Structure formats: structure tokens, C-alpha cells
Image (cartoon, helix red, strand yellow):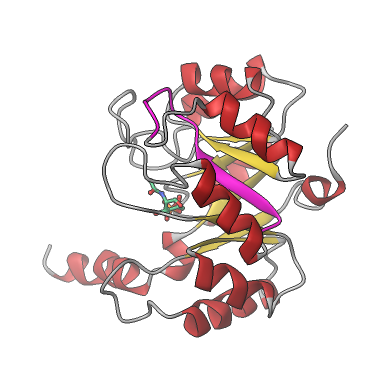
Amino acid sequence: MVHPLIEQLKGGLVVSCQAYPGEPLRHPETMAQMAQAAVIGGAVGIRCQGLADISAIKGQVEVPVIGIWKDGHEGVFITPTLRHARCCMAAGADIIALDATRRPRPDGLTYAQTVEALHAEGALVMADCGSFEDAKMAVDAGSDIISTTLAGYTGEREKTHGPDFELLGQMIDAFPDVPVLCEGRIHTPDDLAQVMQMGAWCAVVGTAITHPTTITTWFADRLRG
Ligand SMILES: CC(=O)N[C@H](C=O)[C@@H](O)[C@H](O)[C@H](O)COP(=O)(O)O
């Protein structure tokens, strides 16, 4: 049985609103404004980072919020421990996304133990996977959603120019009973249409909608040839 909150995301676009450390837009109110703007444009959900951003965004939008807490930048850093996940929950996230790779976690728990503890506390868990093997592990652990988020970032798969269509297809084929979300390098409406046509439950778009510095480089680089 798919939870009603996850059902709400079906067939839709989730917009990731994140600004990175040191960037001009890194402020909870700014991210909350970004999230509101995305919802007005048709986002059915928001993904966001950090406890302050999660609570600021939850205070402004009605759509489900997927919360993460990035701590560090190497190895397991997306909601790396049970403590980080619990804090995201307490900040108001409706769904907690976690690094769902097979790498060791800083608190010594396995991914499955982390999911079990979170489920016992009533949380919904999204698995940020980097490979098919990760996805299998995440499904076995009972994840509520599995996603291609970390494909191309863990050394297990090549970083494709656009979304990792191959991994997405493998996940959709192998796990027909689990919602499979496509996230990572969806840069155009055509990419989005393609992943949804392949059978993704929903898709997350970040950079192409909410990261103006990168979008600017896409244009400015053309001028430099
Ligand atoms: C690998 C990693 O750390 N991904 C992060 C996860 O939250 C974000 O930096 C991405 O922006 C997000 O996944 C959306 O992807 P894209 O920005 O490519 O649409």
C-alpha cells in the first residue's frame, strides 16, 4: 500500500530548492520563496536541505516536503545518520531522504537499521541510490521510495550528461511494486517527459529550475564558444 503522501506525488514534478554553502541565495527565507514560486508553477512537492530550510518551507507550502540534511561533502553525507534523519523529521519534513548507498555510515548503523528505526517512529523514507545494487539493498530495507539521486556521484556509475536513464529503467523493471523516483541532471522538459514516460513515479528537478548560477553558466559558456 502506497502512503497517501507518496500517492500525491504520482506523475508530478518535485522541485529541489537548495543553495550551497557560501552562495548568495543560501537563506531559509529565500529558499521558502523559491519553493512557493515553484509550487505556483506546478510543483507537486519540494525537496530541500537543512533544518532551517525545511521548517521555513513547511511554513509556506502545502505540498509534501522531502527533507535532507547534507553534512560534509565526501562519502555518506546526505542525511548520513539516524540523528540527522530524526532532526529532519522534527523540522517538519514529510518524507526523509537518506543516502542509500552500501558505504559505511558514520554512526555505524546499516541503512536497513536506520530505515527500521525511522519507520518505527512513523517516518517515510526515500532512498538516494547510486547504483542498481544500492536500489536492491534499499528495497530489501523497506524504503518507501527509491531514487536515482546519487547515480554518477559515488564512483559506481558514470556521470551521464543528462539523467541516468539506464539505471532508472533497470530500477523500474526490477521493482514494479516500489515507487521509483528519477532525480539528478534532469535539465530540460524533454528529459522530464522521457523519464515519466519510462514509468518513473515522479521526478525531482533541482539545478535547472532553482540554481541560477549554474543556469547562467549554461548561457554564458555559449558566448565563450
Ligand atoms: C548528488 C547530490 O548531492 N544531489 C543533491 C541532492 O539533494 C542536489 O545537489 C541536487 O541538486 C539534487 O539531487 C537535484 O538534482 P539536479 O540538481 O541535478 O536536478
In which quadrant will I find the N terminus? Answer: top right
- Residue 110 falls left or right of residue 6: left
Q: Which residues are magenta?
A: 93-105
Q: Is residue 97 magenta?
A: yes
The answer to which of 222 and 68 lies nearer the viewer is 68
Instruction: Return the residue found at the far left.
Output: 224
In which quadrant will I find the C terminus? Answer: bottom left
- Image quadrant assignment for residue 19: bottom left
Q: Main secondary structure of the magenta part?
A: loop
Query: Where 67 falls versus 184 (above or below)?
Result: below
Query: Is residue 36 something that shows in the picture?
Result: yes
Q: Is residue 65 magenta?
A: no
What percent of the width, then of the height, locates residue 8? 81, 52
What percent of the width, then of the height, locates residue 211? 39, 69
What percent of the width, then of the height, locates residue 170? 56, 19
- Image quadrant assignment for residue 105: top left
Q: Residue at x 21, y 72 (%)?
A: 220
Q: Residue at x 42, y 37 (%)?
A: 150
**Number of marks drawn:** 0
Query: Is residue 198 something that shows in the picture?
Result: no
Query: Where 111 falls versus 38 (above or below)?
Result: above
- Residue 223 falls left or right of residue 86: left
Query: Where 192 falls versus 53 (above or below)?
Result: above
Q: Residue at x 74, y 21 (%)?
A: 176
The answer to which of 204 and 94 lies nearer the viewer is 94
Q: Residue at x 44, y 33 (%)?
A: 164
